[in-house]
Image (cartoon, helix red, strand yellow):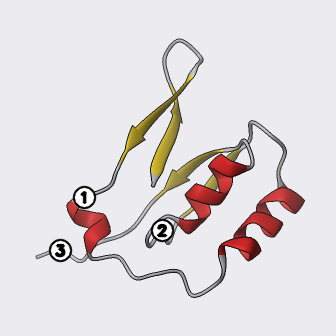
């Protein structure tokens, strides 16, 4: 999975997140990636930012990158 964000120079930067401790415990998406792509394509334009406030393994983020969108994934973790 890749994270995509806007750098200070206005260019898009990407950072690999594989092996990240938070993602190793994430649940898989309960919907197919094709559904995420369809919704993103219908409700956004290329270059838009897609927000997934319940990010599991990043299916929405991966779909956003494939469609030329930037994305923000957030996942609340319980306090220990």
User: In front: 71, or 59?
Assistant: 59
Q: Mark 2 points at which residue?
A: 55
> Marks 3 and 1, Cα distance to the nearest angstrom?
21 Å
The answer to the question of whether label 2 and label 3 lie on touching residues, with beta carbons closer than 8 A, is: no
Please report whichever mark, 2 or 1, sits nearer to the chain's N-terminal start: 1
Question: How many residues crowd around disc 2 within 10 Å: few (fewer than 14), some, or many (20 or more)?
Answer: many
Name above or below for residue 3 compared with residue 35.
above
Name the spot of residue 35 as percent of width and height, x first: 75, 76
Name the spot of residue 27 as percent of width and height, x first: 40, 82
Q: Dividing the picture into quarters, in which one does residue 59 lie?
A: bottom right
Dot 1 falls on a residue whose secondary structure is: loop
Q: Quadrant of the N terminus?
A: bottom left
The answer to the question of whether label 2 and label 1 lie on touching residues, with beta carbons closer than 8 A, is: no
- What residue is shown at x 25% (from left), y 58% (from top)? 19
- What residue is shown at x 58% (from left), y 57% (from top)? 62
Q: In this view, does 62 lie to the left or right of 58?
A: right
**Badge nearest the viewer, 3 or 1:** 1
Q: Mark 1 points at which residue?
A: 19
Please report whichever mark, 2 or 3, sits nearer to the chain's N-terminal start: 2
- What residue is shown at x 32% (from left), y 55% (from top)? 18
Name above or below for residue 31 compared with residue 69.
below
Dot 3 falls on a residue whose secondary structure is: loop
> Marks 2 and 3, Cα distance to the nearest angstrom?
17 Å
Q: Name the residue under label 3.
A: 79
Q: Quadrant of the C terminus?
A: bottom left
**Badge nearest the viewer, 2 or 1:** 1
> Marks 2 and 1, Cα distance to the nearest angstrom?
16 Å
Dot 2 falls on a residue whose secondary structure is: loop
Q: Dividing the picture into quarters, in which one does residue 74 lie?
A: bottom left
Name the spot of residue 5 as percent of width and height, x first: 52, 35
Please report whichever mark, 3 or 1, sits nearer to the chain's N-terminal start: 1
User: In front: 18, or 8?
Assistant: 18
């Amino acid at each position: 999975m890749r994270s995509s964000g806007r750098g200070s120079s206005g260019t898009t930067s990407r950072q690999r997140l594989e092996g990240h401790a938070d993602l190793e415990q994430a649940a898989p998406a309960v919907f197919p990636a094709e559904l995420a792509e369809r919704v993103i394509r219908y409700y956004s334009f290329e270059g838009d930012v897609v927000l997934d406030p319940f990010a599991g393994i990043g299916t929405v983020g991966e779909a956003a990158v494939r469609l030329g969108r930037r994305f923000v994934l957030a996942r609340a973790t319980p306090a220990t």
